[in-house]
């Protein structure tokens, strides 16, 4: 990744609807160059999508929690992950080391609704136990751009 790639990423991250022609004007390079860079970044997996960023709070899910799941030996992480993927309130899940086997970030409409989500998660026979931590405030939202600017 070179300086132009970083500039292209920064510009489209700041203004995702800018368009290739306007980006080429602002960056001082040919339209084809910008398109080629975008294609290369997408093909290599650096750019993973162009969809809008959504606010779970604005969608009516102001409660965020992290579940640490203990998975029954032999149950398999893939089957548990497939179960979690069927629950809309599960935003992401990770196989982890340390205490527990998997972390899941979930959202809910209220603390009472969080219990419903947890009960849904625990319906899988492969999950032995869960512990929950409720997020009180977001201090640093998910971000990747600082990594791009740190590449020299």
Image (cartoon, rainbow, N blue to C red):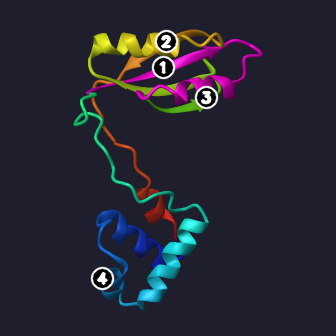
Compared across the picture, whether 83 is left or right of 87 comes to right
Work out how far the residue at label 3 is from the one at label 1, CA to CA, in angstroms.
Answer: 16 Å
* Residue 3 image point, x, y percent: 47, 78
Q: Is label 1 in a helix, a strand or a loop?
A: strand
Name the mark on residue 82: 3
What residue did someone put label 2 on? 131
Q: Is label 2 in a helix, a strand or a loop?
A: strand
* Residue 60 image point, x, y percent: 24, 29
Residue lying at the far front in this picture: please name it: 86
Name the mark on residue 67: 1
Q: Evaluate if marks 2 and 3 touch, with contact meaning CB atoms under 8 Å apart.
A: no
Give the residue drawn at x 51%, y 78%: 37
Mark 4 vs mark 3, foreground winner is 3
Compared across the picture, whether 56 is left or right of 76 comes to left
Work out how far the residue at label 4 is from the one at label 3, CA to CA, in angstroms.
Answer: 42 Å
What residue did someone put label 4 on? 22
In reply to whether residue 64 is colored magenta, the answer given is yes
Give the residue drawn at x 62%, y 22%: 80
Residue 90 seen in this snapshot:
yes
Work out how far the residue at label 4 is from the one at label 2, CA to CA, in angstroms.
Answer: 49 Å
Give the residue drawn at x 54%, y 25%: 84
Residue lying at the far right in this picture: please name it: 74
Q: Which residues are magenta?
A: 62-89
Mark 2 vs mark 3, foreground winner is 3
Mark 4 vs mark 2, foreground winner is 4
25 and 123: which is toward the camera: 123
* Residue 151 image point, x, y percent: 51, 66
Tell me which label, 4 or 3, sits earlier in the chain: 4
Tell me which label, 4 or 2, sits earlier in the chain: 4
């Amino acid at each position: 990744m070179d300086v132009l790639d970083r500039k292209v990423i920064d510009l489209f991250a700041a203004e995702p609807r800018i368009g290739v022609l306007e980006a080429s004007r602002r960056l001082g390079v040919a339209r084809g160059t910008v398109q080629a860079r975008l294609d290369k970044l997408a093909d290599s997996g650096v750019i993973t999508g162009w969809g809008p960023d959504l606010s779970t709070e604005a969608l009516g899910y102001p409660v965020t929690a992290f579940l640490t799941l203990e998975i029954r030996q032999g149950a398999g992480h893939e089957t548990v992950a497939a179960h979690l993927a069927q629950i809309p309130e599960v935003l992401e899940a990770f196989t982890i080391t340390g205490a527990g086997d998997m972390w899941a970030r979930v959202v809910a409409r209220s603390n009472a609704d969080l219990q419903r989500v947890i009960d849904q998660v625990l319906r899988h026979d492969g999950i032995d136990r869960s512990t929950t931590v409720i997020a009180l405030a977001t201090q640093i939202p998910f971000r990747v751009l600082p990594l791009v600017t740190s590449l020299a």
